[in-house]
Image (cartoon, rainbow, N blue to C red):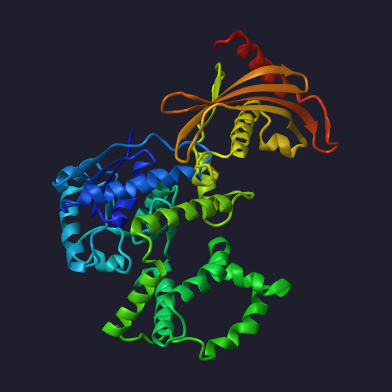
């Protein structure tokens, strides 16, 4: 059964929620009286369709159906999830929640994107909402802070995990939850640094992105400081730097007055720093970099930080493979960082696609991670790739694979990579593999059950039908 999300408020955050659900196979109904809502959400979706699929080594679910509504009852009908993303005014949120309590299905989870209000404040007029606070861009950043009724948050966490996000259940309600309290502290200090002429907006951004920002993305705050403590660990770090808390390093307990002069100063420096780029250009640059960084974070072992969330989500996206001729081994979108200076997919990435296809065959015949841990595997001995047509970032592609030889320690595969939109042939690969003992690093026969599966596939594919 297709799930449905109702998005109440179609701004940047509402549009990000719409994209996150839609690209994970949910139907999405948007309610927003703004006549520009469809255009605004369309621009967010363009960015999301270009970026999100590139995080994964397999295709996302078939995109759901998107509809726009001016009638709230119509928008929330049969919804499994209702997400409020209206402006940060408590009186407005109360009005919206009163309508939702009357119109939304009783089983629907009602979440609020509020950055600062507590559930007790949101529900003081009788609503039953939880905080589901995202981070922009919602379609790429996995964190969703959940605050509110424990049972509802648990149910919400299960649903959100299925669309590839990381639900963080906040133990106690507090103004601004967890992450925004850190951001507010950094923001206040940055305002003082600019106001006092210590640094410009660009210099502050450079201090973050050239230094601790890179560490935080993979290790967070406390794990970073644990490493800083060396072999003695966190206790040593705290003993060394704890006294600094009483030093005059910060003005976090004070806030500079938001005068016109300060606003003009910061706005002017920001224009000088980034004014040569449009907001859409900045968004594309941000998304391109996020995709590359998130892919890097998921590349090692079980993944680090947000990369682990993507890897876990990806595990459930791989389609079931049946014994058929040929076998659909890869379905995916071409990531942004796979293209080169010619504007098309680099030739080295074709090798990765065909390697992924071979991995799927190996898993299918039983040569999976457990098999490899036992000391046995297949090594590629030879490949012959022919490049037939160009392939560009964002294009959906698939690979069909045939076992042309399965005999003893020999495995030969024929791959055809095609464009999904028109089944156009992009490349072919003739790949020869040998079964290897990982301890001796020499070729050897496969385990009997794996050998039997390989031989059966080769016989099936030799017939040319299933």
Image quadrant in which the N terminus is located: top left
**Position in image of residue 16 (x %, y %):** 34, 52
Residue drawn at the location 53% of the way across and 90% of the way down: 246
Judge whether 325 appears above or below 399 on screen: above
In this rendering, would 93 be left or right of 270?
left
Q: Residue furthest left?
A: 71
Judge whether 303 appears above or below 315 on screen: below
- Quick one: 274 or 32, which is closer to the camera? 274
Q: Is residue 220 at all visible to an observer of this figure? A: no
**Position in image of residue 30 (x %, y %):** 23, 47
Residue drawn at the location 83% of the way across and 36% of the way down: 441
**Position in image of residue 44 (x %, y %):** 32, 50
Residue drawn at the location 78% of the way across and 37% of the way down: 375
In this rendering, would 273 be left or right of 426?
left
**Position in image of residue 336 (x %, y %):** 49, 45
Residue drawn at the location 41% of the way across and 28% of the way down: 421
Judge whether 136 appears above or below 407 on screen: below
Judge whether 123 appears above or below 264 on screen: above
- Quick one: 236 or 279, which is closer to the camera? 279
């Amino acid at each position: 059964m297709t799930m449905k999300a109702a998005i109440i408020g179609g701004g940047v955050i509402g549009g990000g929620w719409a994209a996150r659900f839609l690209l994970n196979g949910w139907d999405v109904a948007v309610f927003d009286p703004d006549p520009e809502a469809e255009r605004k959400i369309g621009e967010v979706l363009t960015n999301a369709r270009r970026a999100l699929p590139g995080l994964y080594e397999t295709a996302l679910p078939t995109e759901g159906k998107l509809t726009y509504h001016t009638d709230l009852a119509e928008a929330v009908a049969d919804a499994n999830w209702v997400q409020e993303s209206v402006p940060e005014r408590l009186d407005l949120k109360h009005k919206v929640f009163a309508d939702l309590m009357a119109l939304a299905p009783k089983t629907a989870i009602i979440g609020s994107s509020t950055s600062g209000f507590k559930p007790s404040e949101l529900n003081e007029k009788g609503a039953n909402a939880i905080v589901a606070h995202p981070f922009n861009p919602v379609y790429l950043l996995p964190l969703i802070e959940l605050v509110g009724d424990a049972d509802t948050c648990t149910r919400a966490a299960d649903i959100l995990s299925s669309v590839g996000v990381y639900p963080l259940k906040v133990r106690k309600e507090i103004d601004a939850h967890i992450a925004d309290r850190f951001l507010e502290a950094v923001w206040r200090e940055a305002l003082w640094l600019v106001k006092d002429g210590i640094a410009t907006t660009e210099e502050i951004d450079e201090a973050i992105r050239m230094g601790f920002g890179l560490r935080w993305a993979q290790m967070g705050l406390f794990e970073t400081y644990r490493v800083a403590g060396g072999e003695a660990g966190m206790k040593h770090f705290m003993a060394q730097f704890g006294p600094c808390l009483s030093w005059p390093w910060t003005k976090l307990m004070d806030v500079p007055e938001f005068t016109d002069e300060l606003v003009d100063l910061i706005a002017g420096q920001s224009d000088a720093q980034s004014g040569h780029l449009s907001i859409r250009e900045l968004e594309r640059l941000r998304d391109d970099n996020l995709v590359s960084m998130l892919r890097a974070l998921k590349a090692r072992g079980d993944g680090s930080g947000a990369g682990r969330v993507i890897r876990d989500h990806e595990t459930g996206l791989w389609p079931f493979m049946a014994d058929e001729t040929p076998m659909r081994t890869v379905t995916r979108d071409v990531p942004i960082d796979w293209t080169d200076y010619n504007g098309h997919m680099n030739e080295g990435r074709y090798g990765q696609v065909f390697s992924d296809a071979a991995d799927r065959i190996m898993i299918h015949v039983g040569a999976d991670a457990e098999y490899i841990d036992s000391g046995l595997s297949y090594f590629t001995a030879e490949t012959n790739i022919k490049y037939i047509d160009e392939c560009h970032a964002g294009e959906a592609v698939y690979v069909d694979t045939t076992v042309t030889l399965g005999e003893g320690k020999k495995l030969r595969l024929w791959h055809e990579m095609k464009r999904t939109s028109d089944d156009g042939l992009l490349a072919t690969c003739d790949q020869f593999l040998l079964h290897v003992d990982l301890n001796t690093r020499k070729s050897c026969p496969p385990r009997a059950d794996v050998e039997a599966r390989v031989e059966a596939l080769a016989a099936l594919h030799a017939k040319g039908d299933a």
